[in-house]
């Protein structure tokens, strides 16, 4: 019923000269303005802390007790950054015998091995010509104390 | 100048990124309902397993080859695909996502393209674990061809010069080398020549790509079509196909599936059609459209020769264009009731949303009565979408889709599917410690 009239007034508007009016952004509220309005409110976001390369970041779940010495426990979630070049001393996720394993990378004097963080577990060593494939570097491990 | 970045055996590579035990073994990924191979590892290709090879035949033909078959895990492939495309975007300023595992990039005016290609390739391999091939050429058709060369040289040493493996820039080759590469490539490898055109070309003595590139465009147009002419011009280095604009809205949205088992009763079909309409409606809203009509169809399996055959579909117009799942389901089921006949073993059903229009365009007529309905319906649908986004697909659903505890024979058979490693907290890959 009203539609034709609205349509007409739209055409009329188009022929009016343009009259710029300033547009005031934000909300106007009655009562006292919040003193926090002028401050940027952005809550802590764990992604900022744990994920540096989002495209290259994947999660693994820990299964076993060989890394407790590094504070990595059974059931923890590993934030693995595949964009970081692995270096001596970093905690890495590597491919060993068709499985993923989490260990500390040892790389000194031409020797490469994977070191557990628990003396009851053996080191993983590599023979000449044997290739070690490192999937990514562990940027963080998440232990949840309440589930 | 164009580059094509294409994941090698993409679905298999995605699976291997989370299951290193699959490396160096023949692996195939199967189509819906675990029917036939839609991706093959190099080892599977070397055995002679073809694209589309039915799984039951593979099993019979290579009982001792240790072939591993997996159901398609599109949740995983979708995530890996968006990561790969995002990294590939580093190759050049404009990108066309051509398929789940291929994107074209405009690399005009850039230097050291081969070196740059190797950097991008290494980055994709290291960051997500997926190997890819990069082809570079003066046209999209040549880039696609270069990609074929890059992959073949990598997979089958000796098929092409070894320095073209993985990243191949046809435009940087001296003319004689380029001719040799084109002459070594079957005409059927050209993007744009289908099997039919390729057969006709071979009959006319055009067996390799060099022959095709030497054809006279005007003659080709007379004898075949402008489409074939365009491909020949592209092979000659004359760009005819530009990059397509990013993600144009779809003109129609379909959701159709073959059932895990045939369905005869109305209830089962109702659940399936509800589910398909729900999926289609989600896609509809995510591109900001409304549909004016919905097409619903069912048919029996033409492969089950002993079954009585039935195939029927109908278009149901909506009262007004809608993106509301409830309204779309109501119309789809109205259509289903019209076409449903008892006594047939239905193997496939689907819905298609038609006459899509922009949701922001309001219909003027008599809208005063319904505008608050429309607003509420939009709010309800966005609430539905956010709940399902946050807690997983199907958390909130329409009752006619049935419940999870019911036996839903129409659901896809996917007995060999790996977990959604990257999207489901309960499915994280394990790292032994």
Image (cartoon, coloured by chain):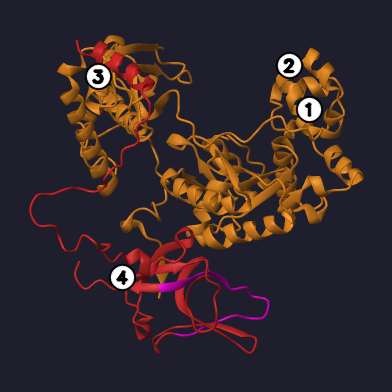
Chain colours: A red, B orange
Residue B365, given in percent of the width and then of the height, sits at 25, 12
Q: Chain of mark 2?
A: B
**Mark 1 or 2, nearer chain start:** 2
Determine which residue is flagged by label 4: A75
Mark-to-mark CA distance, 2 and 3: 47 Å
Mark-to-mark CA distance, 4 and 3: 46 Å
Q: Are marks 2 and 3 in contact (CB under 8 Å)?
A: no
With respect to residue A110, does B124 lie above or below? above
Mark-to-mark CA distance, 1 and 4: 58 Å
**Mark 1 or 3, nearer chain start:** 1
Determine which residue is flagged by label 3: B266
Numbered disc in front, either 1 or 4? 1
Quarter of the image with the C terminus of chain A in it: bottom left
Q: Secondary structure at mark 4?
A: loop
Q: Is residue B364 visible?
A: yes
With respect to residue B215, does B20 lie above or below? below
Residue B232, label in figure: 1
């Amino acid at each position: 019923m009203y539609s034709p009239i609205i349509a007409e007034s739209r055409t009329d508007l188009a022929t009016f000269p343009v009259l710029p009016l300033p547009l005031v952004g934000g909300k106007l509220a009655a009562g006292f303005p919040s003193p926090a309005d002028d401050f940027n409110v952005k809550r802590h976001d764990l992604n900022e802390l744990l994920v540096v390369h989002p495209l290259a970041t994947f999660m693994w779940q820990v299964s076993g007790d060989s890394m407790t010495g590094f504070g990595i426990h059974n059931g923890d979630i590993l934030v693995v950054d595949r964009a970081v070049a692995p270096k001596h001393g970093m905690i890495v996720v590597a491919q060993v015998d068709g499985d993923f394993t989490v260990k500390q990378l040892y790389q000194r004097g031409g020797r490469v091995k994977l070191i557990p963080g628990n003396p009851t577990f053996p080191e993983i060593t590599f023979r000449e010509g044997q290739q070690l494939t490192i999937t990514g570097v562990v940027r963080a491990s998440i232990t949840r104390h309440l589930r | 100048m164009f580059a094509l970045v294409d994941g090698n055996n993409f679905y298999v590579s995605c699976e291997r990124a989370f299951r290193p035990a699959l490396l160096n073994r023949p692996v195939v990924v199967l189509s819906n309902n675990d029917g036939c191979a839609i991706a093959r590892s190099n080892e599977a290709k070397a055995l002679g397993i073809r694209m589309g090879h039915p799984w039951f035949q593979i099993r019979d033909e290579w009982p001792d080859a240790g072939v591993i078959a997996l159901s398609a895990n599109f949740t995983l492939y979708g995530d890996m695909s968006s990561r790969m495309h995002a990294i590939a975007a580093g190759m050049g300023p404009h990108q066309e996502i051509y398929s789940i595992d291929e994107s074209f990039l405009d690399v005009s005016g850039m230097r050291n393209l081969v070196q740059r290609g190797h950097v991008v390739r290494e980055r994709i391999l290291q960051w997500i674990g997926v190997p890819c091939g990069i082809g570079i050429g003066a046209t999209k058709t040549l880039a696609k061809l270069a990609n074929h060369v890059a992959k073949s040289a990598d997979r089958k040493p000796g098929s092409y010069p070894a320095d073209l493996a993985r990243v191949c820039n046809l435009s940087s080759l001296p003319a004689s080398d380029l001719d040799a590469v084109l002459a070594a490539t079957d005409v059927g490898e050209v993007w744009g020549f289908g099997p039919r055109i390729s057969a006709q070309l071979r009959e006319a003595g055009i067996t390799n790509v060099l022959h095709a590139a030497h054809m006279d465009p005007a003659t080709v147009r007379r004898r075949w079509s402008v489409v074939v002419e365009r491909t020949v011009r592209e092979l000659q280095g004359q760009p005819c196909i530009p990059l397509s604009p990013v993600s144009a809205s779809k003109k129609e949205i379909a959701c159709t599936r073959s059932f895990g088992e045939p369905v005869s009763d109305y209830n089962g079909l109702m659940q399936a059609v509800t589910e398909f309409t729900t999926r289609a409606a989600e896609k509809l809203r995510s591109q900001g459209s409304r549909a004016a009509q919905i097409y619903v169809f069912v048919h029996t399996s033409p492969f089950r020769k002993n079954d009585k055959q039935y195939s029927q579909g109908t278009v149901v117009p909506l009262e007004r264009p809608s993106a509301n799942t409830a309204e779309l389901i109501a119309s789809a089921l109205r259509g289903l009731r019209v076409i449903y006949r008892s006594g047939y073993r239905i193997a496939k059903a689907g819905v298609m949303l038609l006459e899509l229009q922009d949701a922001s365009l309001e219909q003027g007529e008599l809208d005063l009565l319904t505008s608050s309905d429309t607003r509420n319906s939009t709010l309800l649908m966005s609430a539905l979408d956010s709940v399902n986004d946050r807690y997983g697909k199907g958390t909130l659903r329409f009752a006619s889709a049935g419940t999870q505890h019911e036996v839903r024979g129409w659901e896809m058979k996917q007995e060999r599917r790996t977990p959604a490693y990257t999207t489901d907290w309960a499915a994280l890959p394990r790292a032994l410690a």
